[in-house]
Amino acid sequence: MEGLSDAGSLPARSICMRDIFVLHAFICGTNRTGYDIWMIDFHTHVLPGIDDGSVDQNMTKQMLLMERGQGVDHVVATPHFYADHISVKRFLEKRAAAFAKVKELQVSMEKSALPKLSMGAEVYYFPGMGSAEQLKKLMIGESGTVLIELPFEQWSESVYQDVRDVIERQRLRVVLAHIERYVEFQRDRSVWERIFALPLIPQINAGSFAKHRGGLFRRDRRRQFCLEFLSDHPRLILGSDCHNLTGRKPNLKEGRDAIEAALGRGALEMIDDVSEEVLV
């Protein structure tokens, strides 16, 4: 893989992507400045007390205020769902109870103080997912979109077949969560390449695009991978994957700023357009 220079610029083969992003903005008739756009954090763990994310209503409030302070208009709540730990019915009950606590916050505050919140799930892969009819109950609102987390191991043919069947047989739109976290496990890239040839939407965590002080080699390599992947696959979406207020806090703006610096404003506009598209 062709790498980034020490200055953090993209390889020559990717520079032309700036032109594609500019063309996209021109065709869509956009002339956006600042953060006057509909910013969506597509992957979060802000619901209180349902998974390893927010622990209570107060943390949820602070996380959502942090999102709003970064200019985020719409947050998609995607608590973890593990089919071998909980039934869909029980998960939906717990999610509804957690959402009720967020509604209490919304009632007690000014309407514009918090971002809009949609309900979804981060569904961890399980064998037979492709034919699991209840998967539709875990989609984001009524959008027909489901966020899937794949295993942190070498992907097999059965993983590919299940993802394909979710798309082709169940007619669901698939978003693959934090795809940059899987690549190190794919020594054999054949299944990886076949999965990304499917009509799905990759999601990358915003923090993976940010520069890190101290030059941690693994993080620098991940950032390099993300910028090159975005250059080659411009139809993707961002999420903070926030869990708390410290080590995994909301950071969508940090990632967006890094993308704009590397690829220009047009890259963000395309990401925003795709994000809105998958929620319809």
Image (spheres, grey):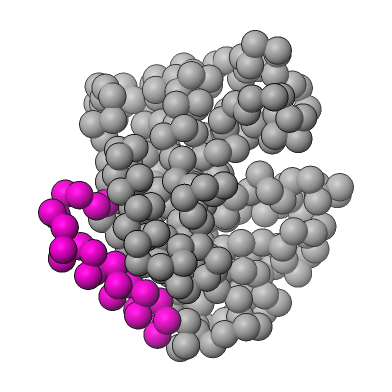
Q: Which region shows up in magenta?
A: 92-115
Along the line of sight, which residue is nearer the eye, 127 or 212? 212
Q: Answer left or right for 6 relative to 253.
A: right
**Residue 69: quadrant of the picture:** top left
Q: Answer left or right for 204 relative to 56.
A: right
x and y percentages locating residue 178 in the rendered image: 59, 50
Q: Residue at x 24, y 69 (%)?
A: 103
- Labels in figure, total: 0
Q: Answer left or right for 259 relative to 220.
A: left
Along the line of sight, which residue is nearer the eye, 256 or 52? 52
Q: Is residue 121 visible?
A: no
Residue sitting farthest toward the right: 187
Instruction: Specify whether residue 103 is painted magenta.
Output: yes
Quadrant in which the N terminus appears: top right
Along the line of sight, which residue is nearer the eye, 237 or 164? 237
x and y percentages locating residue 75 in the rendered image: 35, 54
**Residue 166: quadrant of the picture:** bottom right
Q: Is residue 177 visible?
A: yes
Q: Residue at x 63, y 16 (%)?
A: 8
x and y percentages locating residue 23 in the rendered image: 39, 21
Indicate whether 236 appears above or below 54: above
Secondary structure mostly taken by the magenta-highlighted segment of the chain: helix
Indicate whether 212 appears above or below 14: below
Q: Residue at x 67, y 79 (%)?
A: 128
Along the line of sight, which residue is nearer the eye, 58 or 86? 58
